[in-house]
Image (cartoon, helix red, strand yellow):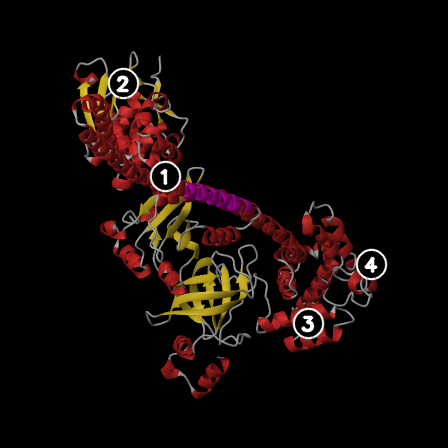
Amino acid sequence: MKQDPALYNSRVLSTYLKLLREKYPEVSISEILAYAGIEPYEINDEGCWFTQNQVDLFYEKTVHLTGNKNIAREAGRLAASPGAIGIMRQYVLGLLGPSVAFQSLHRASKRFVRSSTYVSKQKKTNQVEITVTPHKGIKEKLFQCENRMGFFEAVIDGFQLGLPKIEHPECLFQGGSCCRYLVTWKRTLSSRFTSFRNILMAVFAGAIFPAFVLLPTALFYYSLGCCLLSIMGISLVTEILRRKEMSRSMDNLLENSDRLTQLIESSTRNIELVHQIGQALASKKSVEDVLFTVSEIMERGLDFDCGAILLANKERTRLEIRCSFGYSHLEIGSMMSTVFSLDNPNSQGPFVQAFHQQKNFIINNTQEIEEKLSEKSRKFIRELGVHSFLCCPIVIENESLGVVAVTNQTSKRPLIRTDITLLQGIAPAIGVALQNAALIEEQQLSFEKTLKVLADSIDARDYLTAGHSEVVTEYAAGIAEVLGQTDEYIQMIRIAGLLHDYGKIAVPDSILKKNGRLTPEEREIINTHPAKTQQILNQVPFKGVHKQIPVIAGAHHERWDGDGYPLGLKANEIPLGARILAVADFFEAITSKRHYRNPMPLKQAIDLLHESSGSHFDPEVVSAFIEYLEFRDYALVRPSAQDRRYSAQNGSRRRSPRVEYRTQVSVRQGQRIMSGDIINIGAKGAFIASTDQAKEKETLILTFALPGTEEYIQTSAEVCWCNKESNPRNINHPIGFAVRFRNIPPQVQFLISQFVRRQIVPLKTVSTEEKKVINHSE
C-alpha cells in the first residue's frame, strides 16, 4: 500500500502551537497531536515532515478546541515574525526590504513545504505577484490559502509598513489552476519625495532649452535659479526623510542584534547549566545528595526567584516537597502543611495534573485558574503570594517521579516558553539521577541487610550476645563521626563492625556459651577468631576504602601497648578502624550480661575505660567515645531485638520524658527539605518518623504545630540518633530520627512541659513527690 507523501515541515505546525500557547493556554496540545497522529517529539524536530492528512486533522482539531475559524491566518502572521523566522534572517531582510524578501520566497519555501511551487514576480516598486502552484496529485485545503495570506501580511508588517493590501484574483478553491496573490504595500514618504524630485528634474530638463530661447535672459536665469533651488530643497527633504527611515531601520537592526545576543547568551547559559547538572549528578549516590545538588545549581544558575522539587512518596499517594530554594522557613512550613494528593480524583491542582498527565504547566496569572483549584490550593497560593509559576514533570521510562516547580515572586518576570524548554532539559537529567541513586540505595540496603544477617547468624548462637555486633557498629560509627571521618569511612566502619566477630563461626558452642571462665586451651581457640575473620573476609571483593575491612576486623583485639593478638601490633601500627572497634567492642561487652557475670554499671564501665586508655586503647579514640556518650546523654545503645522503652516510669536514662503526640513536621537542612511526622515529644526533644535520611549531630530547622494549639513553631534541633531500616536501633519506633531542641523559647518549652505532664499522669492525682520527680526529669 502506497503511503501518503510527507509534505509539510514541523516548523509549519509549530507556529500553530506557539499561537496556542500564547493565546489559548487552556487548549490541550497533546489532544490535538494525538488526534493528528503526531508524536510530541516530532514537532520539536526540524527534520520531521508530515502528510496532508495529518495537517488536515491537526487543523480540524485546533479549530474545534479554540472555536477560531481564522486561526490559520493568525498562525501565518506569527510564522513570519522575528521569533519564528529567526532573528538573524530578520536582520538581513531588514537591510534589503520587502521586494528582496519576496524574491527569496521561492528558495525559502522549499524548506517548509513540498506540496507547492512558489514563484514571485515584482510588478511595481511596492507590489509583487506571487503564484503558488500545487504539485500533481496534491490536494491542499482552503485554510492553507488563508495561512499563506497571513504569512504575506506579516512579512510586510515586519518592515513597519503596516498591513499590505492583498488581492487574490485566482484561487485553487474557486476553480483556478493555482493561487495567485497581488501584494501591495505603502510607499515610504522618502520614496514619494524621490519620485516627485525625479519628475521635477525631468520636466526641468525638457523645459530648459525652450525657456532659454523664449524667455528674456534675466527672467531665464531667475527661473533657472528657482528651479534649481526647488530641486535642491526637495532633495534635501528626501535625504532627511531617507536618513530618518534608515535610523529607524538601524534601531530595529540594533534591537534584533541585541535580541540575538541575548538569545545566544541565554542558550549558552542554559546549555552550561544542563551540563553542570549532568556532571554534578553523575557522582551522586543517594537521592538526598541528588536533590541537594540540583537545588543548589538551580538557585545559582536559573533566573527564578524560588523553586522546589516534589517527589511522589513510596505509595504514590501524594507529592512531597523534598528540596527548595528561595523560600523562607515559614513559607516552607505552609507548603508542608498542604497535601498534594495523587489518589484523590478531586485533586485538580497543576502539580498533580502535571504529574498524572506528564504535561508542563505555565501560569502567568494564578487568578485565571483559581476556579479550578480546591480551597486548600487557593489558600496555598495566597499564603505564598504566588502570581505565576511553571511546573514540569520529572519522567523516566514513561513513569512520573515528581515535579519541578519554579516561580518569580520578587522580580515578577513573566515566565515564557524558553523557561519551559530549559526545565524540560533539566528534568530528564534529574529523573535519571534520581533513579540511579534509588537503585544504588536499594543495592546498598540489600548489601547491608545481607551483612546484618551474617552478623546475626553469629550473635544468635547465644541469646546473651544477640545484637552484640549491631551495638558495636553503632558505637564505632559514633566514634568515627566524632573523629571527623568521612561518610564513606563511617560506612566502612559500620560494615567492619557488623562482621568483626564472624570468625567465631569456627568456635564450638561448648566454648562460646561456656558458663564460667575459659581454660587456657579454650582461650587459645577463642583468640583465633580475629584471624579467622580476616581470612574469611579476604575472599570478599571489597572496593575502594572498603578494602580495609578484613584488616580492621582482624585487628580489633590488638592493644595500644602491643600486648594484644593475633599479631601484637602496637600504637599506630594498628589501623585506626581497628582501634575504634576495640573500644566499641570492649564497652559493649562489659555493659552487657554474659553467662559468667552481670552487666557493669555505666559509671564503673566509663571509669574502667579511662583506666585502660593509653595501655589497652588509643587515648584519642577513648576521648572520642566519651564525647559520643555525652552527646547521647549517656543512654546506652541496646540491640533492636530487645524492648527499649524510654519513659519516666521505667527508670531509663532519658533526662526529659516524651509522650505520644502526632503532627506533621517540615524538616529543613540547608537547601534540603524532608517531610515526616512527630510521634512523641518532650520539653527537650522529639522523635520524627521519616523515610528521609538524617545524620547524627546534624542541625535541622523544624516547623510544626504546638501540642494543644493551632500555632506553628519554628526551632532548630540537633539529631541525636537515627532509626534506620537497614539497622533499626529501636524496634518500638518507626524509621526516623530523634532530635534535641536547641534555642527553643522558654514559653514554648513550658507549654510542651505542661502537655507532657498531663499525658504522663492526670494532674489531680499527682502527688507532691511525683511532681518533684517530673520537674527534676525535665
Separation of residues labelled 2 and 1 (CA atoms): 31 Å
Residue 470 in the figure: left or right of residue 36: right
- Reply yes or no: does residue 254 show up in magenta: no
Mark 1 secondary-structure assignment: helix
Q: Position of residue 310 (x, y in %)?
A: 41, 51
Separation of residues labelled 3 and 2 (CA atoms): 90 Å
Q: Nearer the viewer, residue 194 or 257?
A: 194
Mark 2 secondary-structure assignment: strand
- Mark seen at residue 623: 3
Question: Please, what is the three-letter code of the amino acid marked with disc 2?
Answer: Val
> What quarter of the picture does the N terminus occupy?
top left
The residue range painted magenta reads 260-279
Q: Position of residue 126 (x, y in %)?
A: 24, 26
Residue 624 in the figure: left or right of residue 412: right
Viewer-nearest of discs 2 and 1: 1
- Residue at which label 2 appears: 132
Mark 3 secondary-structure assignment: helix
Q: Nearer the viewer, residue 275 or 546?
A: 275
Query: Relative to 290, is 568 above or below?
Result: below
**Main secondary structure found in the magenta portion:** helix
Separation of residues labelled 2 and 4 (CA atoms): 95 Å
- Residue at which label 1 appears: 253
Question: Please, what is the three-letter code of the amino acid marked with disc 4?
Answer: Leu
Which residue is at a point 71% across and 73% down the rendered structure image? 609
Question: Please, what is the three-letter code of the amino acid marked with disc 3?
Answer: Ser
- Mark seen at residue 567: 4
Q: Position of residue 498 (x, y in %)?
A: 65, 56
- Reply yes or no: does residue 272 show up in magenta: yes
